[in-house]
Image: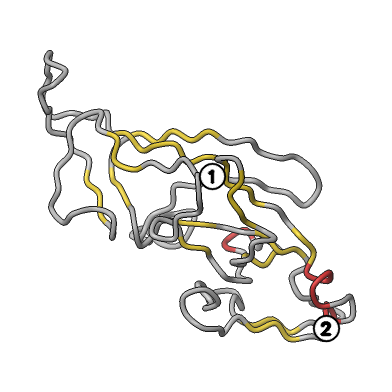
Amino acid sequence: GDWVEAVDESTSTASTAQSECVRSVTTASGSLIDRGRTFCSGELIFEDTFDFFDFEKWEHENTLAGGGNWEFQWYTNNRSNSFVEDGALNIRPTLTADQFGLDFMTSGTLSLQGSYPTDHCTNDAFYGCVRVGNRQHIVNPVKSARIRTISSFNFKYGRAEVRAKLPTGDWLWPAIWLLPKRNAYGTWPAS
């Protein structure tokens, strides 16, 4: 899918002139935003057309945590699972056993305690950094990708437009989330 834009449409005053900036209530933060910057109503404040994967904007999650839904996959920074092609971000699942073998699923140890920034574990909740496979609890069988802008771009108030082609099928749960930078009201789904 393509992250097209985050556009602000809320205003504090009305304006009839197109060239006049009507100050917006939108706020934004992150490494891509100048501190204290104000925005005009309708101003495009974030865009990615995925001509290439921009590591200044996007960060891969690397975790086995599964979030509040216990998603049974390993989110990883691997070009087999996420890549840009023809102006589109592609996220494709693969099988963990294809990399480590079938026996690993019930007897192996998967540790995400790698080096920063590419291989470090991004979420240790719910055994997210280390999994030990056994007959009762196998290692996460599916590898996939999950990307975020938590360090580079966050916004409050505005409009987001996304153009995406989402798959259907067994073991697939495609999602586009607008998640908070901080869990002010508790963990997901409260925040």
- Point out which mark residue 120 bears: none
Could you tell me which residue is drawn at 32 percent across and 34 percent down?
7
Relative to 149, say whether 1 is above or below: above
Residue 182, how many percent across, how many down?
Answer: 35, 62
Circle 2 is placed at which residue position?
134
Relative placement, left or right, of 13 versus 191 is left
Could you tell me which residue is drawn at 58 percent across and 36 percent down?
164
Residue 113, how many percent across, how many down?
Answer: 56, 85
Residue 71, how many percent across, how many down?
Answer: 67, 60
> Could you tell me which secondary element the residue under label 1 belongs to?
loop
Relative placement, left or right, of 77 versus 132 is left
Q: Quadrant of residue 62?
A: bottom right
Q: Amino acid at mark 2?
A: Asn
Q: Quadrant of residue 97?
A: bottom right
Could you tell me which residue is drawn at 59 percent across and 66 percent down?
77
Q: Amino acid at mark 1?
A: Ile
- Give the mark nearest the N terminus, 1 or 2: 2
Name the residue nearer the viewer: 87 or 3.
Answer: 87
Residue contact at pointers 1 and 2, CB within 8 angstroms: no
- Point out which mark residue 176 bears: 1
Looking at the image, is mark 1 or mark 2 nearer the viewer?
1
Q: How many marks?
A: 2
